[in-house]
Image (cartoon, rainbow, N blue to C red):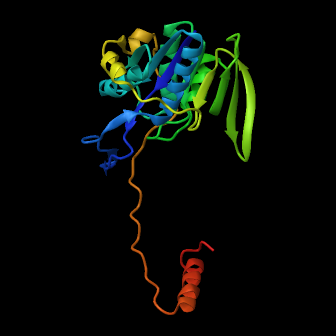
Amino acid sequence: MNFIVCVKEVPDTESRIEVRDGKVVEEGLQYVLNPYDEYALEEALKWQEAVGGKVTLVSLGPERARESILKGLAMGADEAYQVVDDAFPPGDAYATAQVLAAAIRKLGEYDAVFCGKQAIDDDGAAVGVMLAELLNLPHVGVVTKLTLAEDGQSARAEREIEGGKEVVETSLPAVFTAQKGLNEPRYPSFKGIRQARTKPFTLWGGADIDLGDVHPGLELVEVLPPPERPAGRVIPGEPAEAAAEVARLLRAEAKVI
């Protein structure tokens, strides 16, 4: 069986994000493999270990993303394809889904596509759903448990919904988006890290995947930092008096009660 995992490079959560002139300052940022994509990759690797086959990484991003994608190869993926083209509009889920769908079509036959439920930089949580629609495949999102049927023709998934969980069955191929708790991603072994740079890694441009024009659904107008927090206030007095004053301020000024 062949499994495809869509992965993305994102800024490390420990990096200090600075906004200048309406853009995120990229100098000095550290980048990592999107954590939710690691859950997706781990699940694909578990399926591969159970039934055999191949795990292929597909990514859209700048050339520097190779270093993050190599972690996926070190974890155990067999090969990687990265689409690099400055003509693609950045930050738009629909445009990203169009590019990934074209790349997956070029790869040919596959049995399942795995994605993280969202990327931690834009938190859009839309690419996986759009990708399934463009590939005309069933989709199960926010998956916390996934079981491949013995015949390899279907899968049973548990997914989070408000106030509980939902259990669904789907035929394959299908698109699954992974939620935290689906599994525990493995750490790359020393052997895996050494072998990662020797595994097939292919760079594609738009012409290589017969993409044509990409039609974004959104236009990024401006990036703004969050407003600065106002300074805290100390309410003097006896506890009962101070508590009453805090309640008054919350009602009259903050208007939260």
Give the vertical position of 219 relative to 74 (above or below): below
Q: Measuring 31% from the left and 12% from the top, which residue is drawn there? A: 198
Residue 231 seen in this snapshot: yes
x, y (%) of residue 246?
54, 82
Q: Measuring 39% from the left and 36% from the top, which residue is drawn there? A: 10
- 14 with respect to 141 (left or right): left
x, y (%) of residue 94?
53, 29
> Of 188 and 94, which appears nearest the observer?
188
Q: Measuring 31% from the left and 24% from the top, which residue is drawn there? A: 63
> Of 85 and 109, which appears nearest the observer?
109
Give the vertical position of 17 relative to 232 (above or below): above
Give the vertical position of 141 relative to 22 (above or below): above
> Of 154 and 99, which appears nearest the observer?
154
Q: Measuring 55% from the left and 21% from the top, which residue is drawn there? A: 46
Q: Quadrant of residue 24?
A: top left
Residue 215 seen in this snapshot: no
x, y (%) of residue 131?
57, 23
Q: Quadrant of residue 156?
A: top right
Q: Quadrant of residue 134?
A: top right
Q: How many dots with numbers?
A: 0
x, y (%) of residue 223?
39, 47
- 28 with respect to 223 (left or right): left
Quarter of the picture holding the N terminus: top right
- 67 with respect to 148 (left or right): left
